[in-house]
Amino acid sequence: MLPPVLIISMCIVAIEVVVGFMGNGFITAVNSINWIKSKKISAADMILIFLSTSRFILQVTVMMYIHSLYFTDVFKLASVYKAFGAVWMFVNHASLWFSTWLYVLYCAKIINVTQWLFLQIKLRITGMVPQLLLGSLVVSSVTSLPFLWTTPSTYLCSSTGNCRENSTVHISDWDSSHLYILLLYFAGCFFPLVLSVVTSALLITSLCKHTKNMQCYVDSFRDSLIDVHLTVIKSIISFLILYLSSFAAQILLTLSTSQSQDAVKVAVSLVVAGAYPSIHSVILIIVNSKLKLALRMFCQHFKCHLESV
């Protein structure tokens, strides 16, 4: 019998996953339909399709992880454990890269720069998006495939590849496999996180300069540009907060087992880790005018359909 706190946490995670499925599915559907209709796609929409698809897969892995922890023995096979870990790490790193490139693209479009390097990035980044997305997939593969060569110590496996039921490693035990997994995780997250922080710093600096330069003027253009700055800054900061919280929670889950005595820690970690891809998909819809308009139209159509029934 599972502790009540774990049952509650799994119910919350299930709600988060449903919200994430709907949000990411909506983003993918809207941008894909627009792509098919117009036969062309913007750089931002292309990134959003890759991002929402990777988030969808990421949430599938979250559900599989919870199911394997508490309801099935299949993950006690070392080969399955390794394959699942590699897939989870790949989509995690890939979605982080896609989010980073989305905000870099927004930053390049918004800020005014005079330095040659930043100006070249501003002029070329739209055409570079397909290469950046492909490169992100390659880098994510490089940082996740080594997981296949790790030796899982969450369960002590026999020579046949089946893990023994009565031998588990406590959550607090640090060994070479835990360190190896964490190093892979850090390696895939470090550069996109640094790039996201730099992007947010550039946006804040640009906003401060723009506000200072426009203090003598009062017009709608200034207000709209400031609003754009603030919207993107709020979005990227909320993304960083959500991801870093999820980052810490996923590390705890990596070092945890369902037999961990601290059920509250595992339960909270599950909820926090599951919140990131769901809440951020909602934020992306809110800050994107095209997605927000499509959602409003969908809600109106759904409301009219209900009234006609």
Image (cartoon, rainbow, N blue to C red):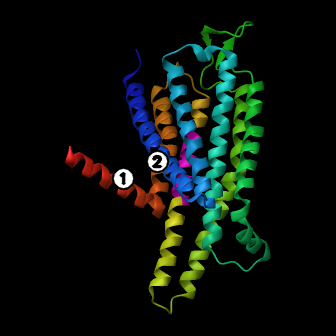
What residue is disc 1 on?
A: 298
Magenta stretch, residue numbers: 236-249
Label placed on residue 26: 2
- Picture quadrant of residue 200: bottom right
**Placement of the N terminus among the 4 image quadrants:** top left
Instruction: Find residue 203 and report its horizontal and vertical position in percent.
Output: 60, 70
For numbered disc 2, what is the local secondary structure? helix
Work out whether residue 63 or residue 204 is closer to the camera in this orientation and state it.
Answer: 63
| Label 2–label 1 contact, CB within 8 A | yes
Residue 16 can be seen, yes or no: yes
For numbered disc 1, what is the local secondary structure? helix
Residue 30 in magenta?
no
CA gap, disc 2 to disc 1? 10 Å
Number of numbered discs: 2
- Which amino acid type is marked by label 2? Phe
Work out whether residue 8 or residue 116 is closer to the camera in this orientation and state it.
Answer: 116
Instruction: From the viewer's perspective, tell me whether residue 183 is left or right of residue 275.
Output: right
Instruction: Find residue 81 and report its horizontal and vertical position in percent.
Output: 65, 21
Relative to 72, say whether 211 is above or below. Answer: below
Residue at x 75% of width, y 32% of height:
145
Instruction: Find residue 208 and report its horizontal and vertical position in percent.
Output: 57, 78
Residue at x 59% of width, y 57% of height:
39
- Picture quadrant of residue 151: top right
Relative to 28, say whether 56 is above or below. Answer: above
Relative to 75, say whether 208 is above or below. Answer: below
